[in-house]
Amino acid sequence: MAKFKLTLEYDGSRYAGWQLQKNERTVQGELLQAAAKIFENQPVEIYGAGRTDAGVHARGQVAHLEIANTRLSPEQIKVSLNDELGHAINILHVEKAHPKFHARHDARSRSYTYQISKRRDAFGKKYVWWVRDTLDLGAMRNAAARLEGFHDFRSFGVNEKEGQSTLVDLDRVEIREDGDRIYIHITGSHFLWKMVRRMVGVLVEVGRGKMTGLDVETFLKTNSNEPARYTAPPSGLFLERVDY
């Protein structure tokens, strides 16, 4: 068996997320179709480090590709995949991987960036969330600091499997401003489904003055459905990096 580690970027606005779905265009599905052509219909498996939702983008998604046998070099695989893929998906790097390497299970942390625009944007609509209200970044940073650390994030996520742990270790929640954009950088061990978008939505409510840092602490101590009401749109979310 040959195994390769892929690093890729994609515009998620064209796809129904990363994960393969029947009758839907997905990033994983596009990769499998391209690989089938390159490897002449040999059985191929591709697994990603994270399952981004519909409309969510990636600058540094990681996946692994398994195939029984190939004489192609990593560079040849990269070029061949890019030749078959549409321009919304781009393979940045391919390298040989250890036979036991797993893109999802072996990941130590994942980093996301959420982009907020302070003005209407003619070109970036698919890649930002335009928030019309003036946001108090000081209050947002104070609330963001309360999210850092090892907590139960069940109020912010969706359990995909019964009995799944909702404990997550957040290394960093940083908010910075650059011109007309606000960037929220989040790094953690892993993330529950919709967790990042709900965190961003709650932080924006804090910035609007409709919530406080104490409300954020309450969400961490209880099982509340309220954060779901403020789920940020997928357009502004990017998977930046996966570390191993």
Image: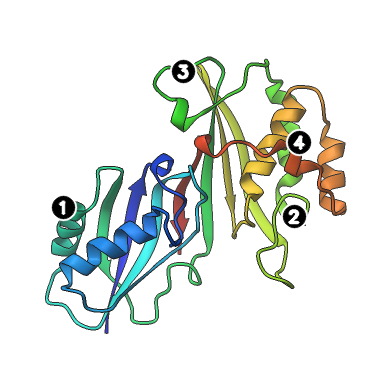
Quick one: label 2, few (<14), some, or many (20+) residues within 10 Å?
many
Residue appearing at x 43%, y 25% in the figure: 124
Quick one: label 3, few (<14), some, or many (20+) residues within 10 Å?
some
- Residue ID for mark 2: 153
Quick one: label 1, few (<14), some, or many (20+) residues within 10 Å?
few
Q: Secondary structure at mark 1?
A: helix
Q: CA distance from mark 1 to mark 2?
A: 41 Å
First of labels 3, 2 by sequence position: 3
Q: On the rendered image, what quadrant is the C terminus found in?
A: bottom left
The image position of residue 10, as x and y in percent, is 36, 46
Q: Which mark is residue 12?
A: none
- Residue ID for mark 4: 143
* Outermost residue toward the front in this view: 23
- Residue ID for mark 3: 121
Label 1 amino acid?
Answer: Asp
Label 4 amino acid?
Answer: Ala
> Number of callouts in the render?
4
Question: Which callout, 1 or 2, points to the residue nearer the camera?
Answer: 1
Q: Identify whether 144 is placed above or below 221.
A: above
- Please tell me which residue lies in front, 155 or 35: 35
Q: Secondary structure at mark 4?
A: helix
- Please tell me which residue lies in front, 22 or 150: 22
First of labels 3, 1 by sequence position: 1
Residue appearing at x 43%, y 40% in the figure: 13
Residue appearing at x 38%, y 52% in the figure: 25
Label 2 amino acid?
Answer: Phe
Q: Identify whether 105 is placed above or below 90.
A: below
Quick one: label 4, few (<14), some, or many (20+) residues within 10 Å?
many
Label 3 amino acid?
Answer: Asp
- Residue ID for mark 1: 83
Q: Name the side, left or right, on which 106 lies relative to 31.
A: right
